Amino acid sequence: MLAFITAQFVLVAVVVVLAAWAILGYNALVRLRNRFVNAFAQIDVQLKRRFDLVPNLVEAARGYLKHESGTLESVTRARAAAVTAGEQAAANPRSGEAVRQLAIEDAGLSGALGRLFALIESYPELKADKTIASLSEELTSTENKVAFARQAYNDAVLRYNNAIQTFPSNILAALFAFRDAAPYQTESPEERQPVRVSLG
């Protein structure tokens, strides 16, 4: 009889320990997932600010660059594509494909802005325009904030992915369908180049 009671006690203790491990592990995974979703929200905030600045810069430059309308149109198109991709990623930041698409479109916008700034550099009267200089300065500041937000997001994704891929938390991750998160990165070296703003 004593052996039976001891066996029951051991069984109950094992069940309690396993249940506590499962609850604590699950909650830890949820917290990590929420951190990377929140980190993406910070990217989204900075990208929206960037997206808002771009049309102002294009409008300010339009008067000077009437014969360079192709460059201005490519910036406008790239912005529109990036905004659409940003909205889709913001609607579901857990979607790796949406985050990858945003990174691609954002890199396209960076490239288009780089070409616009190279063009601005070649027009002294445009470089001297106070509105353009102010917008360029704001855009540079925003680019830096976007870069910091991306790094924070990628750090949060790394912590989350490590948690769901390492033993024993990978057991809970598989059980509760936690999926890998996609880092915010681009594929080609050209897309990795920062927007260069230099009007001084």
Image (cartoon, rainbow, N blue to C red):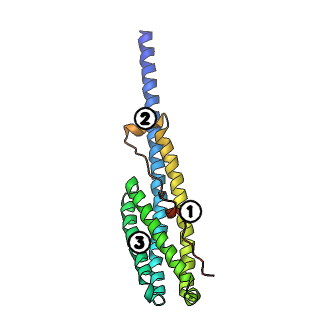
Camera-side mark, 1 or 3: 3
Structural distance between the alpha carbons of marks 2 and 3:
42 Å
First in sequence, mark 2 or 3: give its number: 3
Residue 66 visible to the viewer: yes
**Amino acid carrying mark 2 in the image:** Ile
Provide the residue designation for mark 1: 148
Rendered view: 9 above or below 188: above
- Dot 1: element: helix
**At 51% across and 48% down in the image, what residue appears?**
158
Residue 132 on image: x %, y %: 53, 84
Mark 1–mark 3 distance (CA, rounded to whole Å): 22 Å
Q: Give the residue at mark 2.
A: 171
Residue at the image point whose x is 42% and y is 62% from the top:
102
Q: According to the image, label 3 marks what residue? A: 78
Which residue reaches farthest right?
Answer: 200
Instruction: Look at 54% across and 82% down and name the residue there.
Output: 120
Foreground residue, 156 or 34?
A: 156
* Image point (45%, 61%), residue name: 103
Mark 1 surroundings: few (<14), some (14-19) or many (≥20) residues within 10 A: some
